[in-house]
Amino acid sequence: MTVEEKLEAVLAPAGIGKYGFLRPAEIPFDPAVRAACEGNTCRGYGATWACPPGVGTFADCRARCLSYERALVFSVSYPLEDSFDYEAMRAGMLDFKKVCDRLAEAAGPIVPGFLLLSNESCFRCRTCTYPEAPCRFPEKLHPSIEGYGILVGQLAGLAGIPYGVPGAVTYFGALLFSAQHIS
Ligand code: SF4
């Protein structure tokens, strides 16, 4: 069984149906995505260790991703009553965090040293330690995929999964891994 087959076996139990694999060199990075973060419309910028500038520079993030051999891109869609259904959007966002936690737990024994990028910011603690002290749970910290400067729409297309689903909000994550990773 290959590493990819082992990972595929844990995806459905984690709650993931749509996914694809690619090489980190194929990931579409764009500094404009980081520039958009600085606009702080999501209020995540400078608020936790999961977002810029806490995740490091654009170059750092890109280099970190490129240090792995493979990337698993995945998504989960959550139905909305209408395009103003912010309650369902937030519930989906928080559920996707749990999906990422389950994937991280299952992936640990298969691909130790992985990097898991998740949607948006980090909501694990009532109050984040950023920037006064280190993250309380670095082993459970899943940095923002947008905060890493990745064009998620293009990434989805390259991974062969739909970017959007009609009547739903879709969240994306990426698991960077190597058969044996030395960080
Ligand atoms: S786990 Fe806690 S301390 Fe770490 S980034 Fe998230 S909210 Fe901040």
Image: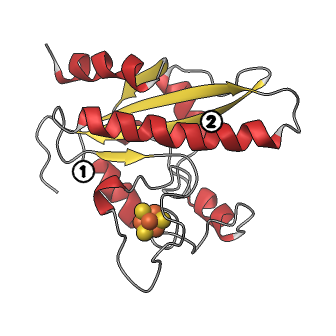
Label 1 vs 2, first from the N-terminus:
1
Ligand 1 within 8 Å of disc 2? The answer is: no
In front of the other: 35 or 122: 122
Residue at 53% x, 72% y is: 127
Amino acid identity at mark 2: Gly
Q: Which mark is residue 153?
A: 2
Q: Which mark is residue 146?
A: none
Is 14 drawn above or below residue 42 in the view shown? Answer: above
- In the image, is 101 to the left or to the right of 156? left
Local secondary structure at mark 2: helix
Is 148 drawn above or below residue 28 in the view shown? Answer: below
Quadrant that contains the N terminus = top left
- Residue 58 in sight here: no
Q: Position of residue 105 (x, y in %)?
A: 28, 38
Residue at 14% x, 34% y is: 179
Residue at 36% x, 65% y is: 60
Residue denoted by label 1: 67
- Residue 75 in sight here: yes
Q: Position of residue 148 (x, y in %)?
A: 48, 56
In front of the other: 107 or 117: 107
Is 53 drawn above or below residue 85 in the view shown? Answer: below
Task: Determine crowd level at label 2: few under 14, some 14-19, many 20+ residues with C-alpha closer than 10 A.
Answer: some
In front of the other: 13 or 154: 13
Q: Quadrant of ligand 1?
A: bottom left
**Which residue of the protein is positioned furthest toward the front in this rendering?**
126
